[in-house]
Amino acid sequence: MYYVYIIENIIDKSWYIGFSTDVDRRLLEHNTKSGGKFTRQKSGQWRLIYTEGYQNKMDALGREKFLKSGSGRRFIRKQIKNYLSK
């Protein structure tokens, strides 16, 4: 399985959108500063707020690319608006 995930910084509420075959391992990497450059530079811990699973790697990568775009970010904010209002 291939996963697209969104993690949120617990301090400044910024998001990181990524792709992995093991979301738990990847979240641990982000929280131990061995993940992506963006998450290494941020203070605080990251928490998982959203995942999508795909059978096909290219589908997952395409979805990740879309979610990182402006229209993709607007779409996902609309989808999880109840979470964001808390």
Image: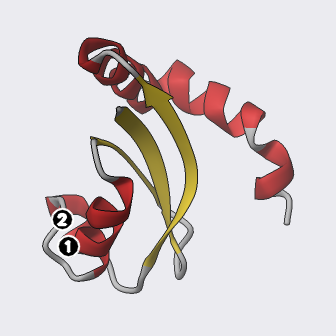
Residue that label 1 marks: 40
Task: Look at the numbered discs 2 and 1 and tell me whether their residues touch, using CB distance below 8 Å.
Answer: yes
Quick one: label 2 or label 1, which is nearer the N terminus? 2
Residue at screen point 28% across, 65% down: 25
**Is residue 40 left or right of 74 when viewed as pictured?**
left
* Quadrant holding the N terminus: top left
- Looking at the figure, which quarter contains the C terminus? bottom right
Name the foreground residue: 63 vs 20. Answer: 20
Q: Residue at x 26, y 13 (%)?
A: 58
What is the distance, in whole Å, between disc 2 and disc 1 at their CAs?
6 Å
Identify whether 29 is placed above or below 76.
below
| Amino acid type at image mark 1 | Arg
- Where is residue 55 shown, x and y percent of the image? 38, 19
10 Å crowding of disc 2: few (<14), some (14-19), many (20+): some
Give the residue drawn at x 18%, y 59%: 36
Kindly identify the residue that appears in the image at 29 percent across and 22 percent down: 61
Q: Position of residue 47 (x, y in %)?
A: 51, 70
When asked about the image quadrant of residue 45, the answer is: bottom left
Q: Is residue 73 left or right of residue 25?
A: right
Per the image, label 1 sits on a secondary structure element best described as helix
Left or right of 25? Residue 10 is right
Q: Which mark is residue 85?
A: none
Camera-near label (2 vs 1) is 2
Mark 2 residue type: Gly
The residue identified by callout 2 is 35
x then y, percent, for residue 16: 39, 53
Q: How is the image coloured?
A: secondary structure
**Which quadrant would residue 80 be assigned to in this image?**
top right
Residue 20: x %, y % from top left: 27, 43
